[in-house]
Amino acid sequence: MQKTVAVLGGGIGGLSTCYHLSKSIQVSKVVLLEASGRCGGWVSTTRREDGAVFEHGPRGVRPAGTTGKYILNMLTELGLESEILPVPHHHVASKNRFLYVKGQLHKMPSGLGGVVRTIPPFSSPIMLSVLKEVLVSKGTQEDESVHAFVSRRLGSELADIAIDALCRGVFAGDSRKLSVRSCFPPLYSAEKARGSILLGMLMGYEKRPPVVRSALLQRAQKERWAQWSLRRGMQALPEALEETLRGHERVEVHYNAPVRRLDNTAAGWEIKLEDGSTLKADHVISAVPAAALAAVLPPAAQPLSQQLRGIPTATVGMVNLEFSGSVLPVTGFGHLVPSSEDRGLLGVVYDSVPFPEHNRAGEPTTRLTIMMGGSWFEEVFGQPDHVTEQELLDRAAEALKTHLGITDAPLWSKAAVLKNCIPQYHLGHWKRLETMRQYISDASLPLSLAGASYDGVSISDVISSGRQAAERLLGKV
Ligand SMILES: Cc1cc2nc3c(=O)[nH]c(=O)nc-3n(C[C@H](O)[C@H](O)[C@H](O)COP(=O)(O)OP(=O)(O)OC[C@H]3O[C@@H](n4cnc5c(N)ncnc54)[C@H](O)[C@@H]3O)c2cc1C
Ligand SMILES: C=Cc1c2[nH]c(c1C)Cc1[nH]c(c(CCC(=O)O)c1C)Cc1[nH]c(c(C)c1CCC(=O)O)Cc1[nH]c(c(C)c1C=C)C2
């Protein structure tokens, strides 16, 4: 097989796809087509001259699970080992996460002491709900909302407060709409395999593929890393991937190359770009958001486009702030706000706590990120295109004052609306994926799907989706 493969989208998913394709001599040419003038997609870092680093997208990656382990091996291959900033499990940013409920910050229960006692805002010990969970009979539905699943198994209080907030802190989404099967596969699989989340966690619920234990992975396990970032910010990861690809003779990287139309001909794909030029490819791997792929597929693939358009997204209002000195009344990773408390304010990340290395040099400062909107964006702020930076800054300042008592004027700020930045895996997402993949197979379309729209939104999941798309094409899986 000597193929030309076009990869659509230069986010972390598209870059990972190209990286894995480039390792095989079966592919004669890899062409990466990215609409914007930069790589990385939602992975975006501001690096100031005084050394301060601000994240506008992802800020930490979990090394847990197969996908988390795999990415550590990739960091070694990319020569990024010395850049890693690990946060171990015993770090205060791993132990302390807060919920803002009824006008007060509450530390989320953690460790044995935290789960055996009644700790506000909960009215009974979490351990009690967990032990009772073993006795709850197994669900029979093919899918369930995250909220319904947790209410049924662990009680409505945990679902209303903790799980509602968790879904906002990962998907910026609504636990009453998000699918447990697609958003939290371990919970769904544990119940299916063992009849209980607790038993599933204790006894195991799936076979995990072996992962090569590189020296870095062994170090992460020995030091018990909970998450990691990079010294020059998360953007250093797509930059390193891009640099590696640029040095590769079989890879072409095109920026400012928005794909406008895909036509499937007898000789393969004809890819029309915005500038009117056309490229040919034997296979296309799409790593653009589902709706962006739907917009460029030919009319004949309408059933697929319709399914792709059915994957919703959430918009996040994001404000990065820097303050002089130490302004936080508590220390930890940050706090989340359940939707019952404030629909528009999702949470606040205390960036300086896990990553003080990203503070400016020479002067003590505090960096915070306030995240707003998500599934509630339009309801609270109106149309994303009409929301001003000042509105976001004012809303962030109000939250910092009421939640944390911070009234100082910031030294530096940046506000942005991240339109449609997180895909929402709503109830039945798994069935939609099955229908789409069946269509691609039945129609013999030389097309693969990668990126955050399908099988996980975390950096590790998205990198893994690119690797899997490449390996399937190369016949390894
Ligand atoms: C605010 C926020 C915080 C997050 N925090 C974390 C975190 O802490 N940890 C974590 O693990 N994950 C986090 N994530 C999730 C993770 O960052 C994303 O899921 C991931 O970066 C998505 O990568 P992607 O390549 O699938 O998509 P994208 O980043 O959306 O990349 C797609 C690319 O396709 C391009 N494109 C679109 N249309 C076309 C076209 N027609 N032609 C050519 N190119 C096109 C776009 O310009 C873009 O560059 C966060 C995400 C957000 C938004
Ligand atoms: C307040 C909004 C958000 C915060 N982070 C995100 C949003 C929308 C986005 C996000 N955060 C994480 C991921 C990756 C998920 C993964 O599987 O690794 C994404 C897409 C990591 C994460 N953040 C929180 C949790 C519980 C997780 C899962 C992994 C982990 O346990 O570390 C909680 C959390 N997120 C935010 C805050 C303020 C917060 C808790 C205090 C911000």
Image: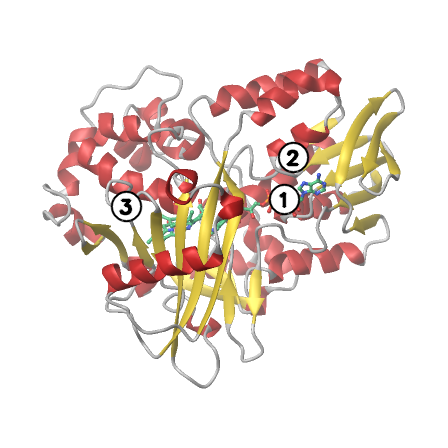
Is tag 3's residue or tag 2's residue first in the polypeptide sequence? 2
The secondary structure type at the circle numbered 1 is: helix
Which residue is label 3 attached to? 342
The answer to whether the residues at label 1 and label 2 have Cβ atoms under 8 Å apart is: no
Is tag 1's residue or tag 2's residue first in the polypeptide sequence? 1
Q: Quadrant of residue 293?
A: top right
The one of 412 and 209 positioned closer to us in this rendering: 412
Which residue is label 1 attached to? 13
**Three-letter amino acid code of the residue under disc 3:** Asp
Residue drawn at (45%, 86%), measured in percent from left and top? Answer: 362
Residue drawn at (36%, 56%), measured in percent from left and top? Answer: 395
Which of label 1 and label 2 is nearer to you?
2
Q: Quadrant of the N terminus?
A: top right
Label 1 beta carbon within 8 A of ligand 1 = yes
The secondary structure type at the circle numbered 2 is: helix
Residue 214, above or below 1:
below
Residue drawn at (76%, 35%), measured in percent from left and top? Answer: 260
Which residue is label 2 attached to? 292
Task: Give the distance between the C-alpha atoms of the residues marked 1 and 3, in whole angstroms.
Answer: 33 Å
Residue 445, percent from left and from top: 75, 21
